[in-house]
Amino acid sequence: MTQTIAPRVRTLVLLLLAAACALLAGAGPASAHAAVTGSDPGQGAVVDKAPARISLTFSEQVALSDDSLRVLDPEGKRVDTAKPANVSGTTYAVPLHSGLPDGTYTVAYQVVSADSHPVAGAYTFSIGAPSKTSVSVSGQSTDDGVVGWLYGFGRYVSYAGFIVMAGGAAFVLTCWQRGSGVRPVQRYVVSGWVALTAATLALLLLRGSFTGSGKVADVFDLSLLGQVLQTKTGAALVSRLLLLAAAALFIAVLFGAYDKREDAEEKRDLTFGLAIGGVVVAAGLVASWAMSEHASVGLQAGIAMPVDVLHLLAVAAWLGGLGALLVALYRAPAQTPVDAPAVRRFSQVAFGSVLALIATGTYQSWRQLGSWSAFTDTRYGQLLLAKIALVVVLVGVACISRRWTGRLAETASVEVPEVREPEVREKERVGARADGADGTGDVEAAAAGNGDASGKGSGEGEGGDEAAPGRATDEQPGPDEAADTERAAQLARQQAARDAAQRKRIRDADPNRFGLRRSVLAEAGIAVVLLAVTTVLTQTEPGRTEQEAKAATSSSASASADTGASGALTLNMPFDTGGEDGKGIVTIDLDPARVGDNEMHVYVERPNGRAFDIPEVKVEFTLKAKDIGPLPVVPDHLATGHWSANGVQIPMAGDWQVDVTVRTSDIDEVTVSKNAQIG
């Protein structure tokens, strides 16, 4: 039976790994985590005269390089005159040449968001009237090529390596201390360390090209590597390498001095020391992710980072320990099988890890999504639903494993023939031969009729005191005796192998152990896919940001006069006053958006679409081409997040600039603007 299980195990593991790789490949290496929430001029806008600069507003802080913002004319020539710079909050601008001719211009941007992910894209606007352009806006993202795919795969390997290394070591220390001397378990933990170290080095080399040109040739560019080392992500990767050196020392002690320590009190003290050191190193490694990715930006970063550390540690204790248990169940030698108490202790550790994952995962979901609708309306929410479903299935299979563990603990131990090492058997044989030389063996000889107890043969004569012909003396063994010794040792080794095989057959024949192995294998298979989904999730734009991006797209589409069949104008403008609860979207509805009297409604909503009140909102209309305005309008508050004004006078048709001043506290205030064709 066990001979047919091994090929099935290998086949299942290969299929699961292939599915995980396919999921990673199909998901795309890294989606942008900062979104463009505003631009001036807006996407597709047509302006009467050339602007002095181009500005972009992002949903979070971004890192700029000299070529992060480029403006290209219809012929593809750059018309920006200086390096891009931060002008206010999350708004960045680049100046343009004066007197630009009419035509369609392309704005291309490539920045790095605060959570370390590249953001790239392009859009067009026109001066005077649209025209043909030779600039292609497709393929702007650097994460679509080979480098992007390799970077995404490296992230998956780094997560997997940490989980295997940390979870395997925790399993040995807390659940099965005898496992420190088991070679397959040692190889399992060491392979995790090797995978994490190799992936970290690869990510460090790939980082410059990944956030820049995306070319394979730039991977080994030392100048790019120097730039990476000066970034937050580069510092995190270097810190990870230093902590991996400490992890190597921890592993060496765990599988060296710890395994050889026999004194119970000394081993207990060493266990405590290794546990403290291991937790510190593991927490430091996890912090290198938390301080440079999702948790480090956005809402409540000071709380989110410790929560993220606890979340990843719980994942490692559960999934990494599960892998170590699987290795122990299938690969541990017959002399040191994993016992029921060890499995029961791991079950308790896994249960605690699941509780921690539920608590921390709930907080992370709220923080990244912000609304129930984001579960179905955003890619992040959809992936999160898939992850939750996998966790539920995994917990269900784990419950089955717990039942098998209980049955295994209740089963009486099976008597297994004693396995004696070849050296022991040879010592016994040599001892028996020595006893025969001392005379004890002559009793057997006498009983066989070959002589008396004194050792004298029936044919003894005058030469009886000499050694018998054909028998070697004690000082010089003869060739026949040496051959017998070698043959006996060989037979002893064969017998030991048969005993070990018999012990393994008896162990594997236990239906409770067999059922536990199958359920743990199923858990490990689901864990592989779960890890792949989690890796893709960390590379996907959070639901909050995606909703802001959708609002920005709607705003850009209505940046110029967005008139429907009724003639009404709608302008959506994201704002950020910089204070607490200072983000939102202000919407201006002007009806019928023509010369003369108009009715205006103002709506203020949070990024998740929920209306909320602010202390003050003011609107001004300016027609710069005719030097008219600003014409102030102070709307009246009607309901939560809703203001209105009647009789808003628009004196003439033209490209009007609509300025909205939003004040969210006594000191936090911002003015956002959009151009719209009215009349």
Image (cartoon, grey):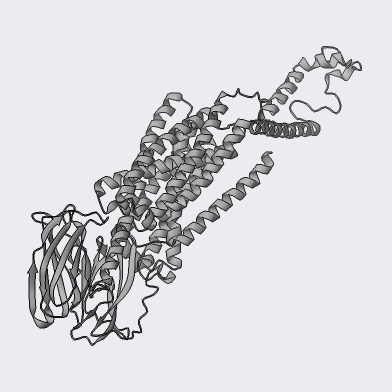
State left or right for residue 274 relative to residue 58: right
Vertical side of 504 occupied by 196: above or below: below
Q: Residue at x 25, y 77 (%)?
A: 45
Q: Residue at x 81, y 16 (%)?
A: 442
Q: Position of residue 654 (x, y in %)?
A: 16, 80
Residue 445 quadrant: top right
State left or right for residue 120 relative to residue 444: left
State left or right for residue 423 relative to residue 129: right
Q: Position of residue 295 (x, y in %)?
A: 30, 51
Query: Which quarter of the rendering shows the C terminus?
Result: bottom left
Q: Nearer the viewer, residue 258 or 572?
A: 572
Residue 238 quadrant: bottom left
Q: Position of residue 222 (x, y in %)?
A: 36, 67
Q: Is residue 197 visible?
A: no
Query: Which quarter of the rendering shows the N terminus?
Result: top right
Vertical side of 243 occupied by 125: above or below: below
Vertical side of 322 occupied by 474: above or below: above
Residue 151 quadrant: bottom left
Q: Residue at x 34, y 44 (%)?
A: 362
State left or right for residue 534 relative to residue 299: right
Q: Nearer the viewer, residue 67 or 401?
A: 401
Q: Is residue 189 visible?
A: yes
